[in-house]
Amino acid sequence: MKMLPTVIANLFSKAATRNYPFDVRAPFEHARGELINDVERCIFCGSCQRKCPSQCITVSKEDNMGTWSLEFFACIGCGICVGACPVNCLSQLTTHRPVATVRSVITHTAKLPEKPAKKTEKRTEPARNEPAQ
């Protein structure tokens, strides 16, 4: 009998959960969601692959092309790879990918960027302080 007031209160109160597929909540401001790679800016250095704790990123260079792959089901969405990228080509959206029933790998391929030419510096002799006479 002690539970009866609680049951009656719950019957006539608002639901505590959302009707998810029909009522989707907006993502939080700094939520970490889908990982995006701007492959045109990527230099394929592999720092994201080395820093990834779940080892879901694979970076390879062959001939003149670079390949960046993400095994989406293994990604935990921590964002460590985003912070490790030296050219900031990785980013995370606040939304997640749609639900998938088949395991897949996301692969981006692009031409490797040209290496900058080495600068040759002209050495100049430092000015010598001559004693005043």
Image (cartoon, rainbow, N blue to C red):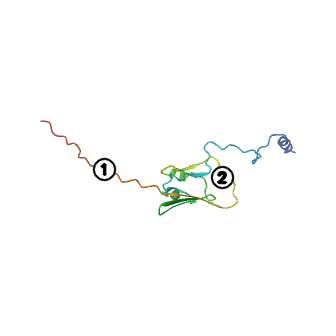
**Where does residue 88 sit, x and y in percent of width and height?**
51, 49
72 sits to left or right of 123: right
Residue pushed farthest left? Answer: 133
Task: Identify which amino acid the numbered label 2 is placed on.
Answer: Arg
**Where does residue 133 sit, x and y in percent of width and height?**
12, 36
Element marked by disc 2: loop
Name the residue beneath numbered marker 2: 97
Of labels 2 and 1, earlier in sequence is 2
Task: Identify which amino acid the numbered label 1 is placed on.
Answer: Glu
Element marked by disc 1: loop
Q: Residues within 10 Å of mark 1 (few under 14, many from 20)?
A: few
Residue pushed farthest right? Answer: 1
Whole-number angstrom distance, CA of label 2 to CA of label 1 = 49 Å
Q: Which quarter of the figure is the N terminus placed in?
A: top right
Height in image: 106 above or below 29?
A: below
Height in image: 131 above or below 83?
A: above
Height in image: 31 above or below 110?
A: above
Residue pushed farthest top? Answer: 133
- The residue sitting at 22% across, 42% down in the picture is 127
**Where does residue 33 sit, x and y in percent of width and height?**
62, 49
Q: Closer to the camera, 11 or 113?
A: 113
Assess whether mark 1 and mark 2 are in contact (beta carbons under 8 angstroms).
Answer: no
Image mark for residue 34: none
Q: Residues within 10 Å of mark 2 (few under 14, many from 20)?
A: few
**Where does residue 48 sit, x and y in percent of width and height?**
52, 56
**Disc count in the image?**
2
Q: Closer to the camera, 50 or 118?
A: 118
Name the residue beneath numbered marker 1: 121
Q: Closer to the camera, 111 or 126?
A: 111
127 sits to left or right of 9: left
Circle nearer the viewer, 2 or 1: 1
